[in-house]
């Protein structure tokens, strides 16, 4: 990979990591997913930045799938899509948690069952 | 800050603590009879909810398990909604001595702290008999907290806290994974006062810890991630308010 390509990969990775951080900060992505995505991006960046590692992987992978720049674009698209999908999952999860909390508080506020003999504080 | 004519809620987040919940409730009622009591039952499956009902304790029951952080947040929302001046949290596993509640509460009042931690380690500054993984984790979190805030907190994962109503709304605005180190960093960076005072804690005798071997790997990564994010967010929030 030439210098321009390496810089482009680093810049793209930095943008992706910043996006993941921002999503977690705004509670739009569960922190566990954020750790996994950042870890994957950093690991990928490390592999790409080491020509020998990249060479070994490319030779192994080329036996399964022909090496192609288009393939990397598809991979990038899938990664972005996964981050978006998991952020939507987090949003739904947060809304569900808020609903469960609200129901719990309303249950605690409900008057005790008249048939019950337990005394409430 | 907590005033003299205060209404205080003691909240006990509980998940599958049927063997100890009655003893904990009895201890709290004996130690601080003038405080109100709330059990947050995090979808327990061992009869904890039924035990709480039999004890006549106000109980907020989650229909699905949400975890410790959300259970604590339910307690904070309840305290906020009902106009309490302070919230005390205590673990349901019987490790905390309910008699320490008054000590921690009075120290919080005297020091005008927004959050006061009952700390296992502040007196000795050593992590004693804790498992190695937990000792390393606690040291890392304390170090990270000190690097980001300049404040030493020795027991970042204490389950006994006194929280002033001044920070209730802030702590419900966003979820914290477990209201431990990340929430402390958030409050300190946002300009709130966090204190620490010594308490005694027994070893857990029944039930199981929420920390499993797998979580011992995932938890430090998540918390370090969150601590840094909390510091950033609190700083941005403070600058925005200024």
Image (tube, coloured by chain):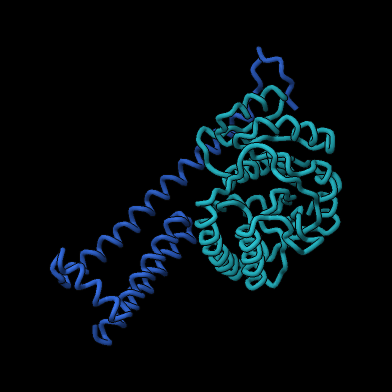
The chain in blue:
A
Q: Is residue B85 visible?
A: no
In which quadrant of the rendered image does the C terminus of chain A lie?
A: top right
From the viewer's side, name the closer residue of B203 and B146. Answer: B203
From the viewer's side, name the closer residue of A87 and A51. Answer: A51
Q: What residue lies at 15% left-to-right and 71% top-to-bottom?
A: A68
Most distant residue in the top direction: A115
Q: What residue lies at 83% left-to-right and 36% top-to-bottom?
A: B34
Left/right placement of residue A44 relative to residue B121 reads left
Q: Position of residue B238 (x, y in %)?
A: 61, 67
From the viewer's side, name the closer residue of B187 and B202. Answer: B202
Q: Is residue B34 visible?
A: yes
The chain in cyan:
B
Left/right placement of residue A4 relative to residue B110 reads left
Above or below B223: residue B12: above
Above or below A75: residue B173: above
Above or below B191: residue A106: above
Q: What residue lies at 80% left-to-right and 45% top-to-bottom?
A: B101
Looking at the rendered structure, the number of numbered marks drawn on it comes to 0
Q: Position of residue B144 (x, y in %)?
A: 62, 69
In which quadrant of the rendered image does the N terminus of chain A lie?
A: bottom left
Q: Position of residue B23 (x, y in %)?
A: 75, 32
From the viewer's side, name the closer residue of A79 and B75. Answer: A79
Above or below B235: residue B31: above
Please identify the quarter of the rendering in which residue B70 is found. Answer: top right
Please identify the quarter of the rendering in which residue B25 is found. Answer: top right
Please identify the quarter of the rendering in which residue A53 is found. Answer: bottom left
Q: What residue lies at 69% left-to-right and 35% top-to-bottom?
A: B38
Q: Position of residue A113 (x, y in %)?
A: 64, 17
Most distant residue in the bottom direction: A3
């Amino acid at each position: 990979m030439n210098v321009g390509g390496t810089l482009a990969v680093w810049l793209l990775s930095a943008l992706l990591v910043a996006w993941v951080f921002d999503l977690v900060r705004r509670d739009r992505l569960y922190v566990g997913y954020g750790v996994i995505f950042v870890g994957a991006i950093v690991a990928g960046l490390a592999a790409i930045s080491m020509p020998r590692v990249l060479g070994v992987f490319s030779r192994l992978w080329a036996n399964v799938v022909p090496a192609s720049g288009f393939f990397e674009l598809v991979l990038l698209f899938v990664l972005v899509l996964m981050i978006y999908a998991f952020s939507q999952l987090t949003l739904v999860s947060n809304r569900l948690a808020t609903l469960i909390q609200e129901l719990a508080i309303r249950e605690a506020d409900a008057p005790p069952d008249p048939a019950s003999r337990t005394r409430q504080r | 800050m907590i005033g003299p004519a205060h209404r205080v809620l003691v909240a006990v987040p509980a998940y599958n603590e049927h063997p100890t919940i009655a003893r904990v409730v009895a201890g709290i009622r004996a130690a601080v009879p003038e405080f109100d009591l709330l059990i947050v039952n995090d979808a327990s499956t061992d009869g904890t909810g039924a035990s709480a009902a039999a004890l006549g304790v106000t109980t907020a029951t989650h229909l699905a398990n949400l975890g410790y952080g959300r259970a604590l947040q339910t307690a904070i929302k309840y305290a906020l909604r009902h106009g309490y001046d302070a919230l005390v949290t205590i673990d349901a596993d019987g490790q905390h001595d309910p008699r320490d509640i008054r000590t921690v509460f009075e120290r919080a009042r005297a020091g005008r702290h927004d959050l006061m931690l009952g700390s296992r380690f502040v007196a000795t500054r050593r992590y004693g008999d804790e498992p190695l993984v937990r000792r390393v984790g606690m040291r890392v979190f304390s170090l990270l907290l000190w690097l980001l805030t300049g404040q030493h907190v020795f027991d970042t994962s204490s389950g006994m806290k006194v929280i002033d109503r001044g920070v209730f709304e802030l702590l419900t605005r966003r979820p914290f994974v477990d209201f431990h180190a990340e929430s402390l960093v958030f409050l300190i960076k946002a300009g709130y006062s966090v204190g620490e005072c010594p308490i005694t804690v027994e070893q857990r005798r029944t039930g199981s810890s929420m920390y499993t071997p797998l979580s011992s790997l995932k938890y430090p990564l998540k918390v370090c991630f969150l601590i840094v994010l909390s510091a950033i967010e609190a700083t941005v929030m403070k600058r925005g308010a200024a």
